[in-house]
Image: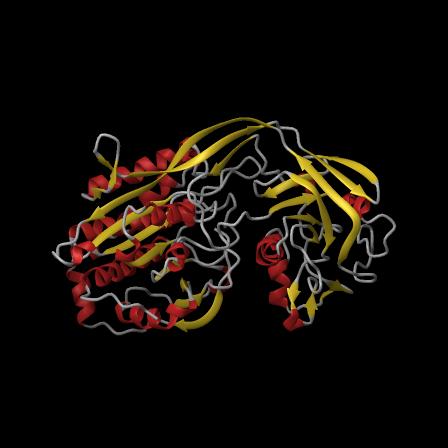
Amino acid sequence: MNRTVIFITLLSVSFFSAGPLRAQQQSDPGYNSITEAGLRSHIYFLASDYMNGRVSTTPEYAIAAQYVASQFAAAGLKPLVMKEGGKPGYMQGLPFARTLYNDQMFWTVTCKGLETKLVHNTEFKILTGNKFNYDHLPLVYVGYGIEEPAHDWNDLKDLDLTGKIAVCLTGAPVKDGKPLLPKAIHEKYSGKRGYFFKAFGGLSGKGAAAVIMVDPDGSSNLVFNDINSSFTAQKTNFVGSQRTNYMSAPRSSVFLAKPAFLDVIMPGMKNNPNGQADILKNYKPQMLEKTFLNSQLELLKEDTLYSNNVIGIVPGTDSLLRDEYIIVGGHLDHVSPQQGQPCNGADDNASGSAGVIEIARAVAMNPCKRTMVFVTWSAEEMGLLGSSYFLKSGLIPKEKIKFNINMDMIGRTGKENEATRAHYVVSNKKYVKELTAFINGLNNGVTDFPILFNDDEHSPGGSDHMSFIQAGIPAFFFFSGVHDDLHNPGDDPEKIDYPKAARICRLGYLIAEKLGNMEVVPTFE
């Protein structure tokens, strides 16, 4: 998953003294059942090359879902979903329209009356997205596409991007070989992942219908010939109830065009950066007059397939509280291969799915007063679709759900925290203060690394806890932080910090047990 987090407060838990809670932990069979070996077994299976990234609408994902269902059954979890004939099952199907396109794609660019035809994979490629048809949309040159007014840089000021295609340079501004923005800001927008922060952190938020990235000088290592287009002739689109927040809105497709594209749309213009030794000399983001792009793809065939959330429950033991629910979940899906290599998603999110399995097994050994629901979500990488569908399905009344614990990346450490192995708890800002105290009180020496409590409100990405927060249900997620292997082929099982993942799971178990047995679950506001 792609996301950034805003630092709010740091809570170091590595110096807490042992006490009665520690003794309780040591005697709790559920707590002690969570092991590195168990996590390793699950992760090595789910993140093997044979699973090819567990993309939600693939046969490999279906195998992963069956694996989770078998683990839930072995742990004694009860199925919740009623199937035809009245038999309960673990699978809740999300409907997808499967479409087969003509594999030929072209752009027609009109610039001041002159038409130029551009060919997919020759002049442009698709970095991400599934929206390819554009009807005479205006183009806007946004320069670097960076909006950092606090640092006296705002490329988007006075530009209306609504319904238009943004043409954006990769990287960040440099003068005489030196970055013009502070180091952290410069690095955020640089490199192969910099386009993500621009496209989804700013440009699409301003209403851009699509984003075309161009690397005019090769400084961002987005070498056109080294990048595989994400386009495939077969596409799947979710056809269930859509989300109502920004994660469900159609997200801008992002393309990579060769530098010569700038000559097509900015002929004879002084601020055309292609071939410029000093891009900043005549630098000027602007609307491109009488410049439009058309793109059409022919649809050949359409049918329907289903991708499953996997759901199991441990029924509550209290006659009154058993009708209230605590949800422990984590997404099972990941992303497509890159450059012919599978993106195995060991941290994102075989680790979290393994954590859900381990916590489920532990809770089944020590049932709570409330009913505990364990879910691995489908289609998180497509926009939190699985968790949103679950909430809108009415399978469990939303007003009866008291909390969601989301396990999304629990096995690595972000680059910024390598010295401490710190891990994140991320939630909406209205819950952060109370959650800090609550989790602090339970983390009595469970982790031997700091926990950082963060606000995700301004993140360009998200995770399934956001579906619950939107529904008014308090939630948080455990998160490793951003590392270089995120959504890349290098996210493999051998790189997982298994001792760390086990400690996160044990802490998650204690949180789940506490929430499951409290007389009243706090609102955390």
Residue sticking out furthest to the top: 300
- Quadrant containing the C terminus is bottom left
Task: In this rendered view, identify the residue nearer to me: 134 or 5.
Answer: 134
Q: Residue at x 66, y 47 (%)?
A: 222
Residue 77 found in image quarter? top left
- Vertical relation: 508 (above or below) 210: below
Q: Residue at x 70, y 58 (%)?
A: 144
Horizontal relation, residue 453 to residue 262: left or right: left
- Note whether residue 309 is visible: yes
- Note whether residue 494 is visible: no
Residue 71: x %, y % from top left: 25, 41
- Vertical relation: 304 (above or below) 316: above
Q: Residue at x 63, y 32 (%)?
A: 297
Residue 503: x %, y % from top left: 31, 59
Task: In this rendered view, identify the residue nearer to me: 358 or 145.
Answer: 145
Task: In this rendered view, identify the residue nearer to me: 132 or 284.
Answer: 132
Residue 431 found in image quarter? bottom left
- Colouring mode (rainbow / by chain / secondary structure / one colour): secondary structure
Horizontal relation, residue 209 to residue 513: left or right: right
Residue 524 found in image quarter? bottom left
Q: Tally the numbered discs.
A: 0
Horizontal relation, residue 90 to residue 431: left or right: left
Residue 477: x %, y % from top left: 38, 58
Residue 165: x %, y % from top left: 68, 49
Q: Residue at x 30, y 51 (%)?
A: 36
